[in-house]
Image: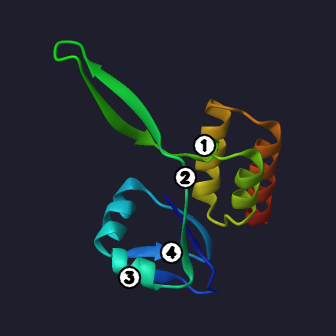
Amino acid sequence: MIVRNSSKKIIVIGKVNLYPKVNLITNEQETILINFKEDLEDNSNLVIEDFPEIYKLKENKENKEIKTVKSGTSIIDLGKRKAISLIKDTVILSSLKTYLKDEKNDKNRSDVVKAIKDQIKEIEV
């Protein structure tokens, strides 16, 4: 999950710090935020970014049963333009490093990798 904070202040919801601009939310933080869903939705400065969710089909051969299991979301699920826009608004170094790792392990789009590296350089200055 990604939450965009348009205010210039850190917003704390249920012990989760939401820094200005883009926040890459861990599974643990997402669980906490779900418990504070009303607070999250009532704050006009916070926007939950839509990520297409990836599903894997698991087939139990004995029962002929097919289950849909959520396997995760990542920057690689976004088109190049949306990914680059998101990268330019990300100011948390650990999030950028996660983006870079995901991108290099999957699509390895040169424009996206360059945008991530440029943003890392900008933050590290």
Specify whether 62 is left or right of 67: left
Is residue 123 shown above or below 105? Answer: below
Residue underneath mark 4: 18
Q: Secondary structure at mark 3?
A: helix
Q: Position of residue 1 (x, y in %)?
A: 48, 58
Q: Position of residue 28 (x, y in %)?
A: 34, 58
Residue at the image point whose x is 32% and y is 25% from the top: 58
* In contact (CB < 8 Å): disc 2 and disc 1: yes
Which kind of residue does numbered mark 3 sit on?
Asp
Which kind of residue does numbered mark 2 sit on?
Phe
Reading the chain from its start, which is encountered first: label 1 or label 3? 3
State how far apart marks 4 and 3 are (Cα). Answer: 13 Å
* In contact (CB < 8 Å): disc 1 and disc 3: no
Q: Secondary structure at mark 2?
A: loop
Q: Position of residue 32 (x, y in %)?
A: 32, 67
Residue underneath mark 3: 39
Reading the chain from its start, which is encountered first: label 4 or label 1? 4
Which kind of residue does numbered mark 4 sit on?
Leu
The colour scheme is rainbow
Q: Secondary structure at mark 4?
A: strand
Which kind of residue does numbered mark 1 sit on?
Asp
- Categorize mark 3 by other alpha carbons within 10 Å: few (<14), some (14-19), many (20+): some
Residue at the image point whose x is 66% and y is 39% from the top: 103
Is residue 6 shown above or below 77? Answer: below
Residue underneath mark 2: 51
Residue underneath mark 1: 77
State how far apart marks 2 and 4 are (Cα). Answer: 18 Å
Q: Quadrant of residue 108?
A: top right
- Categorize mark 4 by other alpha carbons within 10 Å: few (<14), some (14-19), many (20+): many
Q: Secondary structure at mark 1?
A: helix
State how far apart marks 4 and 1 are (Cα). Answer: 22 Å
